[in-house]
Amino acid sequence: MANDKPRFKPYDRPAGGWGSARATAKVLMEQSVIAKGSRALLAMNQPGGFKCPSCAFPDPECRKTLEFCENGAKALAFEATKFRVTRDFFARHTVAELREQSDYWLEMQGRLTEPMRYDAATDHYVPCDWDDAFALIGEHLRGLDSPDQAEFYTSGRTSNEAAFLYAIFVREFGTNNFPDCSNMCHEPTSRGLPPAIGIGKGTVIMEDFAHARAIFVIGQNPGTNSPRMMTKLVEARKRGVPIVMVNPMPERALISFTEPQDVVQMATLGATAIASDFVHVRIGGDLALLKGIMKVMFEREAAGESVIDRDFIRTHTVGMEAVRDEVMALSWADIVAVSGVSEAQIRHVADIYIRSDATMICYGMGLTQHQQGARLLQQVAGLLLLKGNFGKPGAGISPIRGHSNVQGDRTVGIDEQPAPAYLDRVRDVFGFDPPREHGHHTVAALAAMEAGTAKVFIGLGGNFVRAVPDTERAYRAMGKLALTVAISTKLNRGHLIHGKDALILPVIARSEIIRTRAGEQFVTIEDSMANVTASRGVLEPASPHLLSEIEIVCRMARATLPDSHVPWERYSDEYGPIRDKIAEIYPEIYADFSERIKAPEGFHLDIPPRRLVWKTPNGKANFLLFPGLAVDAAVADPAMLRLATVRSHDQFNTTIYSDDDRYRGIYGTRMVLLMNAEDRAERGLENGAEIFAETIADDGIHRRVEGLTVVDYPMARGSVAGYYPELNPLLPLDHYDEISGTPAAKSIPIRVGAM
Ligand SMILES: Nc1nc2c(c(=O)[nH]1)N[C@H]1C(S)=C(S)[C@@H](COP(=O)(O)OP(=O)(O)OC[C@H]3O[C@@H](n4cnc5c(=O)[nH]c(N)nc54)[C@H](O)[C@@H]3O)O[C@H]1N2
Ligand SMILES: Nc1nc2c(c(=O)[nH]1)N[C@H]1C(S)=C(S)[C@@H](COP(=O)(O)OP(=O)(O)OC[C@H]3O[C@@H](n4cnc5c(=O)[nH]c(N)nc54)[C@H](O)[C@@H]3O)O[C@H]1N2
Ligand SMILES: [Mo]
């Protein structure tokens, strides 16, 4: 496939349907896991089975057979692959050679099979005992001048139990340095929503889809990134519910979709049009759009109509008047210019919102990854408050999370700014004094590595160096470290860009059985809608030498903290007692964890806004003022284009399944820039021309990516899109959301030119 000539051909069929079924079969075949993969697929998201390792969207009805999706099947097939990375593989290739290979090639080598240690003398990874690996980690960590010289990364596939213990280990060691994938993802949700509604999570649960009277899908591509959500959208559409898609590009699955599970639709080649309204917003134009909708509401109120929920606002909220005055002072000309949406369409969409008595707003990275992402989300909450869209069926805010357990990891302690109440409980329950000072998030961790103050990096899952901004800087920064530890299932670039000492520690994957001295164990995860369920793998581990993440965390702790009173050995064997400690630390949400997790469908963590309880300092929901229309800093250069780095249909974050992006009609290459034909013509470029892109920044660093093909695409004017992680070299480290530190990966100011 890598040798195929790139092709660009609009995808004119509906998304989903037979295309998805074919793609699922193909991927199982390529990984040579048809029988094994199909068996595992039957256990995925079933009671007694394991949770899909792909996205964080809940599974609609856990008893429905084959409740999986094309991209869940891909994630599983790549995990259950028959290919293996063995000691012979590492003996055959130096690390320098491996660095020359593509991310796709690295991924295709298969599952890691035993712990490996970097040998600088030969530039090879060589086999290493588990005991020696833990001893090396303990030695490095104990040898630091300060615990704050270590960075402890977490990616969101890690279970609640592993993440909880990791948080305890690292705090007993003495730091709050917890960079995690959420810091690049939904951190604006975690930091932006609490001052507004008292919780940094969504307030919608699955049942709400059946009661919503209008659904907004803003800056999110569910057909690719949370395909199980499509089932809910199809049902809503069939009920005649308006679905408003707000996006700088018309994402295929929201235009037309065939449910892979709907036999009739598939047989008749039928399809459902998902979006009733497509709002072709400019990148970064969402604030203007939201304020435009509010302006329509306030104008109609001022004209004597009753369109806002006055009772709700009076009883539950503070601050509406200041927001109203600011919004009323904005001009329609500015709102239209910044959003790129006509006043007529804004009025039409506002009318949909006004008429609906239960509206859900779902959003993804298109809203979070901006320089004022957190404040933008506060305005989403404000719009919902205006019509009392909390605490009733079918209404609320719905951040669609990324990794399958990213929300859970945050809930159980992966947080560089831990709440004092949590730290007090840790002290009382575990008997040590956890550090109080805030630690590093992802961007700060990278800055510490660059400055040379960080010495050790431990990655519990993920592919840090490929996921972060400023690729070349990140590579250099990682290279300065004394020790890098990658706890992983598959080979990735993070293993090849390493510190002076480096370890690869292979783990048992989500779909595999965990056996300890105490017998088979299960773990738990929390999905995007705060539902906690058990996950039990069904496949044999990829190699007999793998350890579970929990055992790795416990043994790192034992090697680092010989005097610890935490019963690490017991936790290695039995996961029930870990859940009992989670219940002790979080009694409000996790009381009786071990009992409640016995229910096959799991249980919901409490979400106070659903009960109209606001855990804010003033006990109210707050309208927060965010003056103006800009979510990204202005750039004077008239040639500037705003670049959004997005996911293709064939990748899971830094894992590349193929070079194709079926729904966008791109085949055989990921080095593209999707551009509006008029923007392209204005720059004197031909469709299909080879171009370079350069970042517009004033920090003196020249960031440039060459060899991109410009492809005509119905993008909003001034807005371009290309793929993550190939375009991460263009994303400056200090281009991030002010409140949360989340890199603004959807709004990189660039200019382009012919090669
Ligand atoms: N198959 C698959 N599933 C995944 C993942 C994967 O890589 N592959 N990743 C997982 C993870 S970690 C996450 S966080 C989620 C990500 O899921 P999404 O949030 O859907 O992720 P993206 O592809 O980054 O892009 C989001 C959308 O934002 C739009 N957009 C860009 N800029 C703007 C803007 O300024 N305004 C608006 N309104 N829209 C904008 C883009 O056109 C795109 O449609 O998916 C999760 N699920
Ligand atoms: N430019 C740009 N950059 C982005 C984004 C963007 O939209 N644009 N999106 C950001 C977002 S939303 C996110 S979430 C981050 C993602 O950042 P990460 O979470 O760090 O990256 P992944 O690619 O998901 O990590 C893949 C690796 O995880 C390991 N792995 C897989 N399953 C398991 C498991 O069960 N256990 C363990 N221990 N390891 C496992 C495998 O070795 C695999 O190679 O990237 C961010 N970076
Ligand atoms: Mo994410």
Image: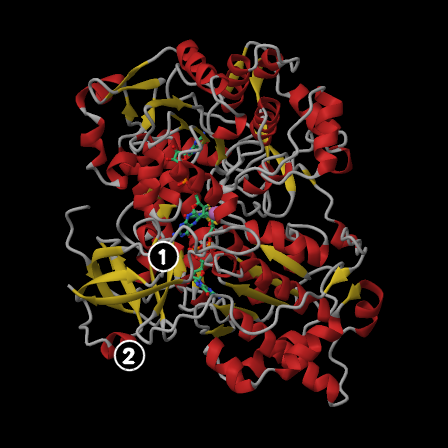
Give left or right: position of 241 versus 338. Answer: right
User: Which element carries disc 1, helix, strand or loop?
Assistant: loop
Q: Nearer the viewer, residue 5 or 491?
A: 491
Disc 2 CB within 8 Å of nearest ligand 1 atom:
no
User: Which element carries disc 2, helix, strand or loop?
Assistant: helix
Q: Nearer the viewer, residue 319 or 344?
A: 319
- Give the amino acid type for the residue marked by disc 2 in the picture: Glu
Sequence order check: which comes first, mark 1 or mark 2? 2
The answer to which quarter of the image holds residue 119 is top left
Residue underneath mark 1: 699
Residue 425, horizontal then vertical, whole percent: 74, 29
Give left or right: position of 489 versus 628. Answer: left
- Give the amino acid type for the residue marked by disc 1 in the picture: Asp
Q: Which mark is residue 387?
A: none
Task: Indicate which label's residue lies in the foreground, 1 or 2.
Answer: 1
The answer to which quarter of the image holds residue 450 is top left
Q: Nearer the viewer, residue 405 or 193?
A: 193
Disc 1 CB within 8 Å of nearest ligand 2 atom:
no
Q: Are marks 1 and 2 in contact (CB under 8 Å)?
A: no
Give left or right: position of 372 versus 704. Answer: right
Residue 137, placed above or below residue 527: above
What kind of colouring is applied to the model shown? Answer: secondary structure
Residue 49 makes an appearance in the image: yes
The residue shown at (61%, 49%) is 190
Residue underneath mark 2: 678
